[in-house]
Amino acid sequence: MTGPGGGVPEALLAAHAHSAAGRYAAAVSLYEQALTLDLAPVPRRQALAGLGVAHRWLGDYADAVAILRAGVAEFPDFAPMRAFLAVALYSAGQADEAVSLLLHLYAEHAGEYRDAIARHADHLDDPLP
């Protein structure tokens, strides 16, 4: 069940289409179906991210966080996965962890301020020394 050109499975293409149209419940089952296949890394990370995001839009915050955490563990260099995880964490009432994650993500591109921003991200609630 691959899509045009044999690259992306039809289930993943359909899941993306349902997500784009706001039909997240339908997208969830299709993302899950796609994840049962032997996917190449890019479609796999797309399916994990899409599944996590769909669960978040449905209000299934615990599922969203769990799926996106697994996605970050599997694809730690895929920045969008970490950003989606931060949004899911925020939605799940874990704002401190969400802000810290976003600050760490931003720090990767902050040049000379990288270490300072990362230090703040790790000590959001700490008073000044």
Image (cartoon, rainbow, N blue to C red):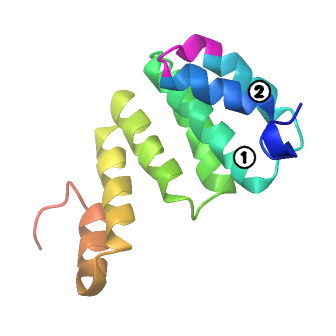
15 sits to left or right of 83: right
Q: Give coordinates of residue 82: x percent, y percent.
A: 48, 51
| Corner quadrant of residue 112 | bottom left
38 sits to left or right of 48: right
Identified by mark 1, the residue type is Pro
Q: Residue at x 47, y 43 (%)?
A: 85
Q: Give coordinates of residue 77: x percent, y percent.
A: 57, 65
75 sits to left or right of 94: right
User: Residue furthest toward the left?
Assistant: 128
Identified by mark 2, the residue type is Ala
Q: Which mark is residue 19?
A: none
| Corner quadrant of residue 91 | top left
Q: Earlier in the sequence, mark 1 or mark 2?
A: 2
Q: Which residues are magenta?
A: 21-26
What is the CA distance from the residue labelled 1 to the residue labelled 2?
11 Å
Quadrant of the image for the C terminus? bottom left
Q: Give coordinates of residue 35: x percent, y percent.
A: 79, 34
Which residue is at the front of the view, 82 or 98?
82
Q: Which residue is mark 2?
A: 11
Q: Residue at x 35, y 45 (%)?
A: 98
Q: Residue at x 83, y 45 (%)?
A: 5
Assess disc 2: are there few (<14), some (14-19) or many (≥20) residues with their C-alpha within 10 Å of its C-alpha: many
| Corner quadrant of residue 127 | bottom left
Q: Which residue is mark 1?
A: 43
User: Residue furthest toward the front?
Assistant: 5
User: Residue furthest toward the bottom?
Assistant: 112
17 sits to left or right of 127: right
Q: How many marks?
A: 2
